[in-house]
């Protein structure tokens, strides 16, 4: 095949970005691949919908079926998002044996197994580089670049909105709510911000990366998710005094089980999303504003870091162009299957429930400053074999409410939760505690 024709479904931010960059760099792509790339049609929601780059009206249609069913369209690019019509589009194209490119993390996260099975059944491929961390080619890195490694640890700052908010809170000493409102006003956060700030967007992405790293399907229900709403300016300030920065982290790591079970011989991994204190000396602490970064540790390669823009019309288009190149070459060379994305090569791996995960913690309490307060708290922790590694209490007036910050040595999540529930009930504790994890990247 010397010419590959594309059909794009979705002409919004990403779709028009792909169109624009195909115009600018299409010839470069063609010369590198030795294949002509044609663009047949772009299906859009409405011809006059706002888009960052103009698309000629002659290329647009509002009927996606005419694009997918066009026998001259060899590769279908799904850029509509969501998990309903997008799924129908992809399955329709795969059933026709057409390779599909998608940027849809929510869809892959929810229905990946079904979609990859459909691609395999119909002898074609599904490409999804743009689904995680936009311009960072992390899917290719895990799937191909590190195919000879066991991935023991993967940490990702994969949500630009949260990273932007946390960065501004740190730089300006501002609190969460006003910073979120300002981010919405400036267009950095959605009017309904829940997908981003409650950690679900990171959950989709980290599930895909964890699945690739470990060869098993990690379902959204397997992932422990906490967002950034509980993080206050006080936490950012005290974390700073202790030498840490707070980031929303996606975490996939091989772990020793705290609680040995009959299945103890199985390998365990922890897959979570939570705001974490990370040492200022770690490179991820310097990933600021809307930038994303993924830190991967392989048993052969050691520590690696991938940094770039995680979203937006241009960074995401870069990932789609890379998938276009792969799809075109695979069609030319009739490569039906690349390195399989998710196979049972690690079927002896299980996702550990968060309750069994062990880590260090930061706890912020609001307590009455009076004799015996710290002793009561320490007694409850000691009864659960939980050790305090450091304490900060700013000087206040006796009898008044003050913040009390405790750094906690390694402890199982379940023990920490139970101890904190008891501490919350003490009459000297005046507000619900804030519990954050501390990542040391050991
Ligand atoms: N809303 C995401 C972010 C980008 O803020 O990173 C799309 O995944």
Image (spheres, grey):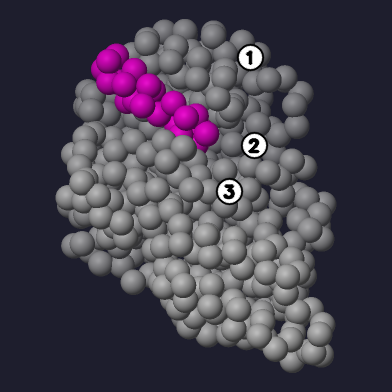
Q: How many marks?
A: 3
Q: Is residue 372 above or below residue 333?
A: below
Q: Position of residue 221 (x, y in %)?
A: 46, 37
Query: Residue 65's quadrant in the figure?
Result: top right
Q: Is residue 38 visible?
A: no
Point out residue 284 in the picture as x, y percentages from the top left corner. 48, 69
Main SS, magenta region, reads: helix
Neighbour tally class for label 2: few under 14, some 14-19, many 20 plus, Cα within 10 Å: some
Q: Sort mark 1 into few (<14), some (14-19) or many (20+) by Cα contacts within 10 Å.
A: some
- The residue that label 3 is drawn on is 199
Q: Quadrant of the N terminus?
A: top left
Could you tell me if the residues under marks 2 and 1 are in contact, i.e. CB atoms within 8 Å? Answer: no
In front of the other: 112 or 81: 112
Secondary structure state at the residue bearing disc 2: helix
Residue drawn 50% across and 16% down? Answer: 89
Q: Nearer the viewer, mark 1 or mark 3?
A: 3
Find disc 1 in the rendering and name its residue. Answer: 61
Relative depth, front residue between 25 and 70? 70
Q: For this view, does 335 lie left or right of residue 4? A: left
The image position of residue 177, as x and y in percent, is: 79, 58
Q: Give the CA separation, mark 1 to mark 3.
A: 35 Å
Visible residue check, residue 84 = yes
Real-space CA distance between mark 2 and mark 1, rounded to the nearest whole angstrom: 17 Å
Q: Circle 2 is placed at which residue position?
A: 13
Sequence order check: which comes first, mark 2 or mark 3? 2
Q: Tell me the CA gap for discs 2 and 3.
A: 23 Å
Q: Is residue 291 magenta?
A: no
């Amino acid at each position: 095949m010397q010419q590959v024709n594309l059909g794009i479904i979705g002409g919004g931010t990403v779709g028009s970005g792909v169109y624009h960059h195909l115009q600018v760099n299409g010839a470069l792509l063609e010369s590198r691949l030795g294949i002509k790339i044609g663009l047949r049609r772009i299906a859009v929601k409405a011809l006059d919908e706002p888009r960052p780059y103009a698309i000629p009206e002659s290329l647009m249609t509002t009927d996606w079926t005419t694009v997918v069913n066009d026998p001259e369209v060899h590769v279908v690019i799904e850029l509509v998002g969501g998990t309903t019509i997008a799924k129908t589009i992809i399955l329709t194209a795969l059933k026709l044996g057409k390779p599909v490119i998608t940027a849809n993390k929510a869809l892959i996260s929810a229905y990946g197994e079904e979609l990859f099975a459909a691609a395999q059944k119909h002898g074609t491929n599904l490409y999804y580089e743009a689904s995680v961390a936009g311009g960072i080619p992390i899917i290719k890195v895990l799937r191909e670049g590190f195919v000879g490694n066991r991935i023991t640890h993967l940490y990702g700052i994969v949500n630009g909105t949260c990273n932007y908010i946390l960065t501004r809170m740190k730089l300006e000493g501002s609190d969460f709510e006003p910073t979120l409102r300002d981010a919405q006003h400036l267009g950095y956060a959605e009017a309904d911000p829940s997908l981003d700030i409650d950690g679900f967007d990171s959950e989709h992405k980290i599930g895909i990366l964890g699945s690739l790293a470990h060869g098993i399907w990690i379902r959204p229900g397997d992932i422990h998710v906490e967002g950034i709403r509980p993080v206050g300016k006080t936490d950012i300030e005290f974390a700073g005094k202790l030498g840490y920065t707070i980031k929303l982290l996606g975490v996939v790591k091989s772990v020793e089980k705290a609680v040995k079970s009959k299945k103890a011989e199985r390998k365990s991994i922890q897959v979570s999303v939570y705001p974490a204190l990370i040492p200022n000396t770690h490179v991820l602490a310097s990933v600021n504003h809307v930038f994303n970064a993924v830190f991967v540790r392989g048993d052969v390669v050691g520590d690696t870091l991938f940094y770039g823009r995680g979203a937006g019309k241009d960074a995401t288009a870069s990932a789609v162009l890379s998938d276009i190149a792969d799809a075109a070459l695979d069609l030319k060379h009739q490569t039906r299957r690349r390195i399989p994305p998710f196979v049972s090569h690690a079927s002896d791996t299980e996702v550990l429930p968060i309750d069994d995960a062990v880590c260090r913690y930061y706890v912020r309490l609001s307590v009455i400053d009076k004799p015996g307060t710290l002793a009561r708290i320490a007694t409850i922790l000691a009864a659960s074999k939980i050790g305090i590694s450091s304490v900060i209490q700013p000087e206040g007036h006796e009898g008044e409410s003050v913040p009390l910050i405790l750094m906690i040595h390694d402890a199982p999540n379940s023990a920490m939760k139970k101890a904190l529930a008891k501490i919350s009930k003490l009459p000297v504790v005046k507000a619900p505690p804030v519990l954050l994890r501390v990542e040391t990247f050991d």
